[in-house]
Amino acid sequence: MTEAANLTYAFAVCRGGDLTSPAGPLAELPGLGTGAPVRTVAAGPLTAVVQDVPAAGYDEAALRRRLSDGAELELCARAHHAVITAAWALAPTVPLPLATVYLDDGRVRVALTDRQTSFLTALDRIAGRAEWGVKVYAPTGPPPAPAAAPNPAAAPAPAPAPAEGPGPGGSGRAYLDRVRTRQRGREQRHTLALGAAERVDTVVRGLAVAARRLRPHGVEVTGKHRTQVLNAAYLLDLGRERELRAALASLRHDEMDVRIELSGPWAPYSFADGGITDAGAAP
């Protein structure tokens, strides 16, 4: 049997909305840049947003090579996200994982039918809602220097600082004491930051209909001068953005020892459980 020249790449699953217009917003998107239009495949009440992709560039082996390259991975992820965002603006949308590829449209329809209940449940959960990301960072640098003496002219000259090394005798003990003091200071600051993160999470959860704690990013993402102590996603009803921003502004005023960052609104990636990445996907 001759292998198909094209596969069907699936971006998202939607319900309702103006998704099928040939001149609509989806048709204007480049998608993955294959030259084929972004289009839809329907099955019952569900609609998948898809694009034809060449089998030679999107089969299992080709995708493995493509996504192992950092630059190529970023391009694919950005294109995937752009299509999902456009669909979400038109209808309740379940984002699908990056590189969800099917042999043909028929396999997509079968998957939509087989997973109809889980998709409809997810769509009910996220309809009229958006995802917001909240991240809290603790500084990793030394604590702030103490304030200067009120009258520097009258203050006695400071004693010479001991050498920064273990050295013999008493200087070695002094060095170890300084090391222990710095370590205790770091631990205390981290403990305070964790407490601040929990207070931030409690406040935002009070506004959300659902919340999810994600794995904190490491230094390769955050940089070495700060530590992420909260990485969370929250599902909020549309229209609560002003309340969310006001709550975080108040928290920033109260929690001066940490940095609080807000991102969004996003399509509800973290709360759209369900997908069509099971049997039927391209090998």
Image (cartoon, helix red, strand yellow):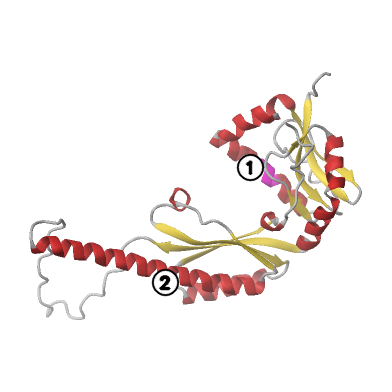
Give the class, few, some or many, for how many residues have Cα within 10 Å of label 1's Cα (few <14, many ≥20).
Answer: some
The N terminus lies in quadrant: top right
Which residue matches tag 1? Answer: 77
Q: Is residue 247 above or below residue 95?
A: below
Q: Position of residue 149 (x, y in %)?
A: 20, 78
Q: Nearer the viewer, mark 2 or mark 1?
A: 2
Q: Is residue 176 above or below residue 34?
A: below
Quarter of image, res 282: top right
Q: Position of residue 34 (x, y in %)?
A: 72, 31
Q: Residue at x 57, y 58 (%)?
A: 214
Q: Which structural element holds mark 1?
A: helix
Q: Position of residue 76 (x, y in %)?
A: 64, 38
**Apparent side of residue 102 relative to residue 216 in the rendered image (left or right):** right
**Apparent side of residue 233 relative to residue 146 in the rendered image (left or right):** right
Q: Amino acid at mark 2?
A: Leu
Q: Which structural element holds mark 2?
A: helix
The C terminus lies in quadrant: top right
Mark 2 vs mark 1: which is more N-terminal?
Answer: 1
Extent of the magenta region: 77-82
Q: Residue at x 63, y 71 (%)?
A: 205
Q: Which mark is residue 192?
A: 2
> Closest to the observer: 161 or 247?
161
Q: Position of residue 221 (x, y in %)?
A: 48, 50
Q: Amino acid at mark 1?
A: Ala
In the image as oriented, which residue stretches furthest toward the right? 44
Is residue 20 among the parts visible in the rendering?
no
**Apparent side of residue 274 relative to residue 178 in the rendered image (left or right):** right
Is residue 67 among the parts visible in the rendering?
yes
Q: Is residue 3 above or below residue 113?
A: above
